């Protein structure tokens, strides 16, 4: 079998309908699980896809059946005129869901413009609800500003659901759990814990540092019984409601419970490389042919062929696992 015309599929029978687009590798934070404190080497501006190039590629992906697009980075709001990109992508036929993942630092400033431009959903990454511990993990004293950003986007009722994502790390997140439960119970934000993956810039990840979703859930259930909600197709999170009151909490368990069999995702890096897995060791350059004058059909062919080769699964838990040379901020999480 080989890649055929029609919607994007891989050789394992999965339809690929979800595209994560990184718009920059730069960031105003230095989260410990993502970037080193110093010494990151950034892409040159001319290396980045322009908004027009991103829009053209996303239109081709949409013609190939992609319906969901999430903008990420680096920190997407750190890219100049970012709401303009949202507006351009909003105009593409076939994109049913246009979402953003942000650290929230600039969200207060851009919330209204993002909604006006047509953003559907926003995820905000918050790893601690205590100011000093937030500072410790992100290396920025920015919790108040992030919470203001979260409140600014939440004022727009059509941007729902709003998800708050926390990376779960052993010997850190255990002490955050009750504050996050309180947030989930007192707001309509869906709080989700993400297992720490070996994509950090410091290369300090170890299996022992992963605080699993099952461990966190057991800890939460010592106080608040949880009831699992039906899993939506392709959902990465297992979502629960509190049995004793309102609120939802989710667990994204890529390390302890890989969800590769149901994965429908592709990723486009800020410099235009197509990745078929977070942990891919190979990439397909779309920028070079695009800048050399390739037609839409030629680019679609390259995309189809790369999608077809999507990895069956990641191998984080297998002996001899090799982490990709790129770390999370350079891939687009
Ligand atoms: N800067 C934005 C943010 O932080 O939301 C978007 C990019 S960030 C790379 C996307 C997501 O990846 C964030 O929720 C972040 O917490 C998560 N992330 C980064 N490094 C990670 C790692 N090593 N393991 C698990 N999640 C990670
Ligand atoms: Fe920046 Fe997001 Fe990485 Fe934190 S997780 S350093 S906010 S890209």
Image: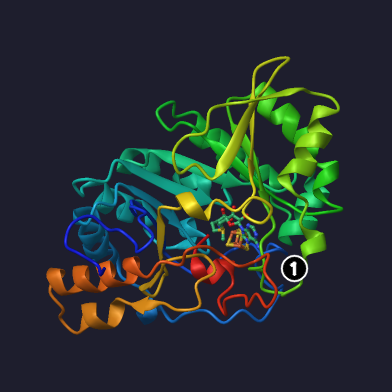
Task: Decide which of 279, 123 is in the foreground and name it.
Answer: 279
Q: Residues within 10 Å of mark 1 (few under 14, many from 20)?
A: some
Q: Which residue matches tag 1? A: 205
Image side of residue 325 versus residue 47, left or right: right
Measuring 21% from the left and 63% from the top, which residue is drawn there? Answer: 56
Q: Position of residue 138 (x, y in %)?
A: 71, 58
Q: Position of residue 203 (x, y in %)?
A: 72, 75
Quarter holding residue 27: bottom right
Image side of residue 258 versus residue 242, left or right: left
Look at the numbered disc 1 and give the secondary structure of its residue.
loop
Q: Position of residue 139 (x, y in %)?
A: 74, 62
Ligand 1 position by quadrant: bottom right
Q: In this picture, is 203 found above or below 250?
A: below
Q: In this picture, is 126 found above or below 4?
A: above
**Can residue 142 be seen in this snapshot?**
yes
Quarter holding residue 292: bottom left
Position of the N terminus, as image quadrant, is bottom left
Task: Decide which of 31, 181 is in the foreground and name it.
Answer: 181
**Can residue 26 be seen in this snapshot?**
no
Image side of residue 21 versus residue 104, left or right: left
Image side of residue 276 versus residue 307, left or right: right
Q: Position of residue 154 (x, y in %)?
A: 51, 31
């Amino acid at each position: 079998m080989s890649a055929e015309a029609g919607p994007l599929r891989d050789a394992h029978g999965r339809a690929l309908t979800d595209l994560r687009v990184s718009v920059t590798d730069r960031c105003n934070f230095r989260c410990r699980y993502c970037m080193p404190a110093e010494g990151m080497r950034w892409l040159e501006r001319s290396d980045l896809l322009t908004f027009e190039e991103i829009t053209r590629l996303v239109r081709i992906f949409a013609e190939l059946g992609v319906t969901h697009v999430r903008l990420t980075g680096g920190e997407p709001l750190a890219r100049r005129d970012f709401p303009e990109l949202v507006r351009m992508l909003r105009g593409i036929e076939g994109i049913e869901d246009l979402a953003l993942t942000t650290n929230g630092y600039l969200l207060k400033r851009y919330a209204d413009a993002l909604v006006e431009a047509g953003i559907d959903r926003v995820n905000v990454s918050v790893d601690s609800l205590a100011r000093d511990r937030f500072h410790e993990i992100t290396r920025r004293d920015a919790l108040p500003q992030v919470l203001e950003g979260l409140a600014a986007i939440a004022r727009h009722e059509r941007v729902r659901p709003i998800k708050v994502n926390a990376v779960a790390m052993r010997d850190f997140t255990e002490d955050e759990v009750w504050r996050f439960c309180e947030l989930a119970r007192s707001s309509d934000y869906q709080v989700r814990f993400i297992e720490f993956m070996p994509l950090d810039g410091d290369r300090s990840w170890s299996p022992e540092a992963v605080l699993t979703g099952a461990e966190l859930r057991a800890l939460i259930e010592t106080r608040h019984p949880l009831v699992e909600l039906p899993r939506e197709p392709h959902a990465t999170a297992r979502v629960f409601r509190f049995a004793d009151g309102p609120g939802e909490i989710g667990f994204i368990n890529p390390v302890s419970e890989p969800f590769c069999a149901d994965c429908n995702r592709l990723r486009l890096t800020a410099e235009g490389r197509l990745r078929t897995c977070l942990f891919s060791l190979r990439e397909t350059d779309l920028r070079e042919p695009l800048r050399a004058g390739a037609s839409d059909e030629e680019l679609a062919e390259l995309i189809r062929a790369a999608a077809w080769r999507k990895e069956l699964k990641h191998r984080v838990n297998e002996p001899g696992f090799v982490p990709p040379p790129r770390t999370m901020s350079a891939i687009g999480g």
